Image (cartoon, grey):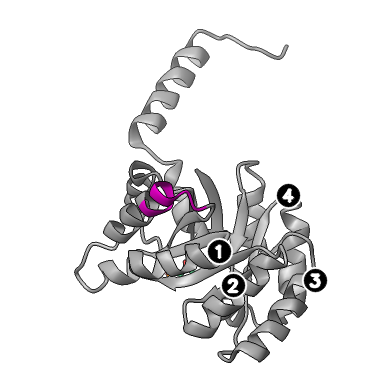
């Protein structure tokens, strides 16, 4: 599973990148707006911070012609940029156009397997199935993820299913169980993946016993 961090905050990106296991970054207009900085400067700093990462940057127009202009502009900024496109009718047309041009895309705001099917048929590189926003409505957002993973496998689509709108580590566990290709999440949830009380207790016991024995590695 690829791990992406979902943020526009460059310091958060740098922290996640410091572990050496970060595969990319997803942003969206809300996350970029929160930075208080310019879109292009923020995205380019993120590309610099994650040299081999796949960096999603979203278009904001909702008509095909302007979406295409925005997509070509954004994708020209850096070779690692993936153009993020909302699942609306002109968005699917745009994904088909970009796919035919060899430009990577991330179709976002996907909530059903039927939406994911449209994105896969258009040639989406990534399909962002939102989970948390469905769970927020007392429904099981992970169901569409599992169905979407099965759909791309059944029909041999190249699209990768990306678990998005992740609210807690269990969403990551469930994404793994569903066979999702990627999970993107806020830094605080990535940090939670490290944590287990038995890890902390076990390390304490190791170090207490080692120190009590007066042992050293470095003289
Ligand atoms: O950025 C896409 C997605 O991860 C947003 O999640 O938490 O705003 O529902 P959230």
Q: Which mark is residue 52?
A: 4
Q: Nearer the viewer, residue 35 or 113?
A: 113
Q: Earlier in the sequence, mark 1 or mark 2?
A: 2
Q: Nearer the viewer, residue 216 or 31?
A: 31
The residue tagged 2 is: 95
The residue tagged 3 is: 77
The magenta stretch spans which residues?
A: 151-157
Q: Earlier in the sequence, mark 3 or mark 1?
A: 3
- Residues under numbered marks 3 and 4 in contact, where contact means CB atoms less than 8 Å apart: no
Q: Is residue 91 shown in magenta? A: no
Which numbered disc, 1 or 4, marks the residue closer to the eye?
1
- Residues under numbered marks 1 and 2 in contact, where contact means CB atoms less than 8 Å apart: yes
Q: Earlier in the sequence, mark 3 or mark 4?
A: 4
- Residues under numbered marks 4 and 2 in contact, where contact means CB atoms less than 8 Å apart: no
Report crowding for label 3: few under 14, some 14 to 19, many 20 or more residues within 10 A (C-alpha).
some
Q: Secondary structure at mark 4?
A: loop
Q: Position of residue 191 (x, y in %)?
A: 48, 49
Report crowding for label 4: few under 14, some 14 to 19, many 20 or more residues within 10 A (C-alpha).
few
- Residues under numbered marks 3 and 1 in contact, where contact means CB atoms less than 8 Å apart: no
Report crowding for label 1: few under 14, some 14 to 19, many 20 or more residues within 10 A (C-alpha).
many
Answer with the quarter of the image where residue 38 lies: bottom right
């Amino acid at each position: 599973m690829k791990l992406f961090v979902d943020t526009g905050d460059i310091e958060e990106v740098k922290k996640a990148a410091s572990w050496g296991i970060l595969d990319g970054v997803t942003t969206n207009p809300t996350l970029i707006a929160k930075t208080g900085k310019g879109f292009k400067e923020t995205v380019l700093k993120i590309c610099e911070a994650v040299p081999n990462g796949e960096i999603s940057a979203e278009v904001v127009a909702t008509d095909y012609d302007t979406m295409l202009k925005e997509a070509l502009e954004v994708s020209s900024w850096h070779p690692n940029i993936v153009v993020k496109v909302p699942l609306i009718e002109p968005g699917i047309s745009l994904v088909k156009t970009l796919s035919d041009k060899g430009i990577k895309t991330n179709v976002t705001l996907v909530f059903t397997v039927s939406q994911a099917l449209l994105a896969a048929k258009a040639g989406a590189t990534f399909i962002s199935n939102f989970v948390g926003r469905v769970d927020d409505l007392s429904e099981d957002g992970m169901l569409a993820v599992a169905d979407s993973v099965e759909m791309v496998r059944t029909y041999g689509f190249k699209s990768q299913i990306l678990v998005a709108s992740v609210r807690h580590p269990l969403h990551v566990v469930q994404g793994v169980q569903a066979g999702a290709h990627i999970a993107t999440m806020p830094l605080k949830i990535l940090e939670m993946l490290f944590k287990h009380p038995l890890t902390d207790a076990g390390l304490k016991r190791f170090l207490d016993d080692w120190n009590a024995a007066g042992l050293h590695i470095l003289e």
